[in-house]
Amino acid sequence: MLLRSKVPHAAAPRSRCALCLRWATLLILSGYACGQASVSQSSGILEQIPGTSRHVPGKAADNTAVVFAEIKDQSGRPVVGARLTFTGSNGATANCPLDVCRSSADGIIRVRNVSSGLYDLVVEKSEYQQYRFSQVSLSAALVTILEVVLVEGAPATPESKGPAGVPGATSTGGEEGGSPYPGLRQTAPSPPVEKIEAITPDSELFSLQPYRWTLEMPEWRRYANQGVTPYARSRWYDPFNRNKLKGDYPVLGQRWFLNLKATSDTEFEGRRLPVPSGVAAENPGRSGFFGRGEQAAISETVRLSFELFRGDTSFRPVDFRIRVTPAFNLNFLHTRERGLVNVDVREGPQRFDAHIGFQEAFVEAKLHDLSPNYDFVSVRAGIQQFSSDFRGFIFVDEQPGLRLFGNLQSNRLSYNLAYFHLLEKNTNSGLNTIFKNRQQQVYVANLYWQDFFAKGYTTEFSFHYNQDDGKVHFDDNGFLVRPAPVGLVVNDKVNTHRIAAYYLGWTSNGHIGRVNVSHALYQVFGHDDFNAIAARRLKINAQMAALELSVDKDWMRFRTSFLYASGDSSNRSGASRTDDTARGFDTIVDDTHFAGSGLSFFNREGIRLTGTGVGLVQPFSLLPSLRTNKEEGQANFVNPGIYIANAGADFDLTPKTRLFANANYLRFARTEPLELLLFQRPIRHGIGTDLSVGLEYRPPLTENITFTGGVSTLIPDKGFQQIYDKKTLVAIFTGVKLQF
């Protein structure tokens, strides 16, 4: 049966095409056919469309009704959040969750599975008058359509009226002319039953495919010049379509898959750094203390990853996995001073080196499935990648370890319990050695919590323990890196020392509303058996804090950030020797992606502290830790600390091209450790202004081919000038990354 009427300020009548389009939507929603009839209403248009039922073998008949409501305001705009309620004739209400019975952004409410019966249907929202359809008969043979125009004003409860002023909008049926409403054609057809023959495995419409993985897609020939087609045949060298080498279908049985990955990273860099003069002059004053700092470096790294896993192609975590990733590196460095590429000055100003290492070699097994929503717990043993937080502040490495990990609450919570026993690194490539023990152990426990207090905002709580036992170690270029060649290194023996440091952290990454938020807070405590700068045992008490905020506007992202790492304030001489606490913050092995990341000069370049054998800052780190080497050296908590204020922007110029701009201002938190090491006082706090710009280009719109390039510069401030000189430092870099 169809009921229809006009209301004040109702929208203009729709065309027959628009009405049919809406009916087609309803048929998809409910599975009913349509009929016609109409009657006038006072508060909205109500249509009830009779239909046919379909009998499916083995399925009980459906005896529930369907309601479709379209809600607009007086201007014809959809009303969002209007509520539709059902009240039965016996006072019972239909089961309708709020998220279903509230209108969507297009003003639509779709309700299925409403029990048959007589109902009062009420549409209401604050600041609008309420509308009611009284005693509407809902049955399985009808799709009921409500078209309501809400009128602004104090809430009222006008009842819909029939044309004779009688409440109600329906009748129980009857022949044409038998309705109490003039001009109403009421029908109550008996729906025919459509019988569908049962489908059996022997029928022509159905056939079993015990091995479906090798079924080819159908041929596609719509245009003479094909271009990109929806059905592409698989080729072993094509990583974008179905490929047996990329885990798209099994290699053994139905559940064993192979995934091969090859990556080539080629990087070139030209830079100017403050370096010491390599050869003393014959006559005083003929050679400056600082030499020619121009350098050129090129590096090529190829990684081949072989992975065999048991699972399927859904989102379900794999049951078992074996992965091996060997890496091959070639690197060349050209400088203009001797004593930089090797401790032996006879090696000259150039160096070529090659190295092979295993960056991954692990076995992973799922221990248990915890829920139907892919919650699980797994264990992984062997050399594996691990980053302990979002931005790589504390520990990022590929090391041998044992890791227990999984998730809970439909992946809202995820966790790691990990233990690593570190290998030594090759000095010039940064790859793992085969297989030299580092005598350093790292323990990590962390918990990630999605939608922590806002949807889209993920937070992490973590604990790290770094136990670095230390032993005498020279790097591959012959330089002493453990212990650091500074302070009291040798007395009656070489002063090796043990560090035990505990990190408590809270970090986050995500967005709160339109604002993207990322932050980090870390407290480290513990002890250092013998710090060479302090020349005695020290307790550790240091802090780090970082915050980044950004906003996206169309194709642009504007961001600002701030980082603070505490510094040590004691001069470590005279009366200050009574201070037994180191307060300079340092990490385990960091790879910091913050305040411009690798685009920043201070982050990207390793700047040596001339005349000390240690670095002011290590490559891809923001902390002036005064350690010899980020991987091979030991953490040092007697350092100046730092303040960094950052502003930058990212621009998606095209879908394939992205531009980055970044500016940092840097200051030392304390300068006493620098004054002690350099026998120079005073040293100001200003480091300088770091400016950089970079470009990324991806020709195929994927990560398979990526070109990067950029230029960065550090304009020295007073403190940096007092340590080095007034020369502006510059770096130009390019890179090509290829992946299969």
Image: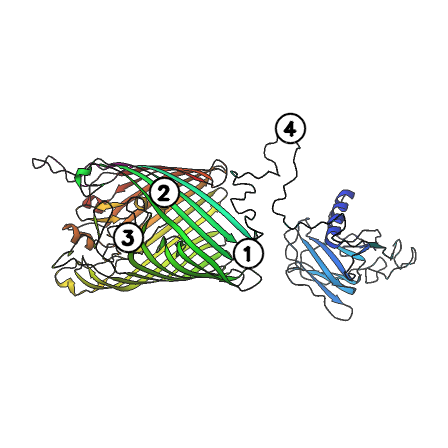
Where does label 3 land, which residue? 642
Mark 1 near mark 4, Cβ–Cβ under 8 Å? no
Q: At label 1, which amino acid type do we have?
A: Arg
Q: Which residue is mark 1?
A: 316
Q: Position of residue 479 (x, y in %)?
A: 21, 47
Q: Residue at 32% of width from left, 47% of height from top?
A: 430
Residue 147 visible, this angle: no
Label 3's element? strand
Pick whichever of labels 4 and 2 is earlier in the sequence: 4
Query: What's the amino acid at mark 2?
Result: Phe
Quadrant (top left, top right, bottom left, bottom right) of the N terminus:
bottom right
Assign a secondary structure to mark 2. strand
Q: Which residue is mark 4?
A: 224
**Residue 328: mark:** 2
- Image position of 515 (left or right of 282): right
Mark before the other along the chain sequence, 3 or 2? 2
**How far apart in space, not on screen, are marks 1 and 4 (Cα)?**
41 Å
- Marks 1 and 3 close (CB-CB < 8 Å): no
Please, what is the three-letter code of the amino acid marked with disc 4? Ala
Q: Mark 3 Cα within 10 Å, few/some/many (few <14, many 20+)? A: many
Q: Is residue 548 magenta?
A: no
Part of the protein shown in magenta: 270-298
